[in-house]
């Protein structure tokens, strides 16, 4: 387990935390610069009485995100962001995912929990083989492995013979 306090909460505690977080997120969005807040103008955080109320919230679609390219969909000023990733843009307009330092830290914890679930520990050497470009694949694994304390080999995609050499020579375990 990576975070026993959170990972052993009762169902009731989890739902209470989720409900509080949902209201906080909605309040933050409604007071933000994001043009997506218009979708939620008729919903107040206090209207959310239980997680069953999720079905009453409007969806944000990929088209919504494309409509507000590049940064009109994000809730904070772009100057508050530490990095960005994006979709491939194969349909024309890529979707940008701008992230604050807090977003990155949260992503790291989520991925650390995933890696711990797969039985990785700080004793593992992990070779990260997804891309490290604008697509975010490799970075999530990297942040999670970093939080977990693993030895990281950021190999990226391709070069199969080099990948195999690194696995063998460095004693990669995951």
Image (cartoon, rainbow, N blue to C red):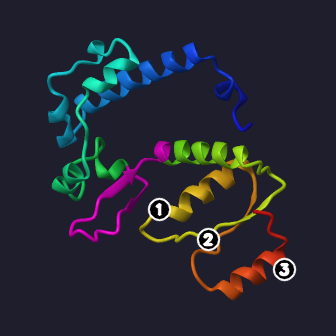
Please state the horizontal and vertical placement of residue 40, each as a whole percent of the image. 19, 29
Residue at figure coordinates x 71%, y 38% from the top left = 2
Q: Residues within 10 Å of mark 1 (few under 14, many from 20)?
A: some
Q: Which residue is mark 1?
A: 136
Name the foreground residue: 51 vs 99.
51
Report the magenta residues as a range: 81-103
Please state the horizontal and vertical placement of residue 27, each as a whole percent of the image. 29, 24
Q: Quadrant of the C terminus?
A: bottom right
Going from N to C along the chain, the mark reached first, 2 or 1, is 2
Quarter holding residue 155: bottom right
- In space, the residues marked 2 and 1 are separated at their CA atoms by 12 Å
Q: Quadrant of the N terminus?
A: top right
Question: Would residue 96 be found to the left or right of residue 132 on screen?
Answer: left
Q: Which residue is mark 3?
A: 169
Number of numbered discs: 3
Please state the horizontal and vertical placement of residue 136, each as a whole percent of the image. 47, 62
Whether 96 is among the magenta residues is yes
- In space, the residues marked 1 and 3 are separated at their CA atoms by 27 Å
Q: Secondary structure at mark 3?
A: helix
Q: Which residue is mark 2?
A: 129
Q: Secondary structure at mark 2?
A: loop
């Amino acid at each position: 387990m990576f975070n026993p306090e959170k990972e052993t909460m009762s169902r009731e505690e989890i739902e209470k935390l989720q409900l509080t977080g949902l209201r906080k997120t909605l309040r933050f969005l409604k007071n933000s610069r994001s043009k997506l807040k218009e979708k939620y103008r008729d919903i107040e955080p206090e209207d959310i009485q239980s997680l069953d109320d999720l079905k009453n919230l409007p969806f944000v679609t990929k088209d919504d995100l494309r409509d507000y390219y590049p940064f009109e969909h994000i809730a904070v000023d772009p100057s508050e962001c530490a990095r960005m990733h994006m979709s491939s843009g194969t349909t024309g307009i890529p979707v940008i995912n701008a992230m604050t330092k807090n977003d990155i830290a949260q992503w790291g914890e989520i991925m650390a929990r995933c890696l711990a679930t797969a039985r990785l520990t700080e004793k593992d050497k992990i070779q990260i083989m997804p891309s490290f470009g604008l697509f975010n694949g490799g970075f999530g694994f990297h942040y999670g492995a970093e939080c977990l304390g693993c030895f990281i080999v950021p190999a990226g995609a391709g070069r199969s013979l080099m990948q195999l050499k690194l696995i063998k020579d460095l004693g990669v375990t995951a």
